[in-house]
């Protein structure tokens, strides 16, 4: 009986056993942090690419190929201008272009203008085999600039 009580109180292998039980949790946490950091970094690059396309349109005027090329050349990652940039005439309300009133004026009284809407996107694939519900398959960003 004293031998069983002695085995019960032995602590020699407890640290190794606890480490073995917690190692998968730590690895899961670290891989999630790594993929989350990659997602944030990718989102920053995609946003910079969309803003580069809008900036190109502001400087050079509306040119579909020029804006598309500016988006693709903005970063070293595979960012594309998808859907294609578009020129819209109207009034900017938030991120949407709305039509002017019958007199060609916006709600604030200023005249309607031409806006270039640039959407950039890049694929995202996490390093760990996470379920699809955790991470988006595509990172998207949008930028709008007035050109007229």
Image: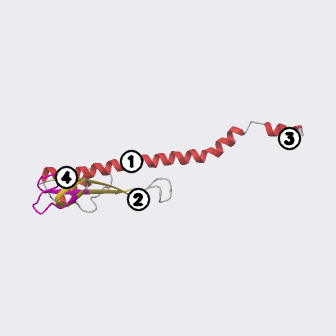
Kindly identify which residue carries mark 1.
40
Per the rendering, the mark at residue 55 is none
Task: Identify the magenta region.
Answer: 97-118
| Marked residue nearer the N-terminal end (1 or 4) | 1
Marks 2 and 4 sit apart, C-alpha to C-alpha, by 27 Å
Point out residue 113 in the picture as x, y percentages from the top left corner: 13, 56
Kindly identify which residue carries mark 3.
4
Per the rendering, the mark at residue 137 is 2
Between 125 and 61, the one nearer to me in the picture = 61
Q: Is residue 110 magenta?
A: yes
Residue located at (32% from left, 49% from top)? 45
In the picture provided, is 96 more to the left or to the right than 77? left
In the picture provided, is 30 more to the left or to the right than 119? right
Q: Residue furthest left?
A: 103
Q: Quadrant of residue 97?
A: bottom left
| Marked residue nearer the N-terminal end (2 or 4) | 2
Residue located at (44% from left, 48% from top)? 36
């Amino acid at each position: 009986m004293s031998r069983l009580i002695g085995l019960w109180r032995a602590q020699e292998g407890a640290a190794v056993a606890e480490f073995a039980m917690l190692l998968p949790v730590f690895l899961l946490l670290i891989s999630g942090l790594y993929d989350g950091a990659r997602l944030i970094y990718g989102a920053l690059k995609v946003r910079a690419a969309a803003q580069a396309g809008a900036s190109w349109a502001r400087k050079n005027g509306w040119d579909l190929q020029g804006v598309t090329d500016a988006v693709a050349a903005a970063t070293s990652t595979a960012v594309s201008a998808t859907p294609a940039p578009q020129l819209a005439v109207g009034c900017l309300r938030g991120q949407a272009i709305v039509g002017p009133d019958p007199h060609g004026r916006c709600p604030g009284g200023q005249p309607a203008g031409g806006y270039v809407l640039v959407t950039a996107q890049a694929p995202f694939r996490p390093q760990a085999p996470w379920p699809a519900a955790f991470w988006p398959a595509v990172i998207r960003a949008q930028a709008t600039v007035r050109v007229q």
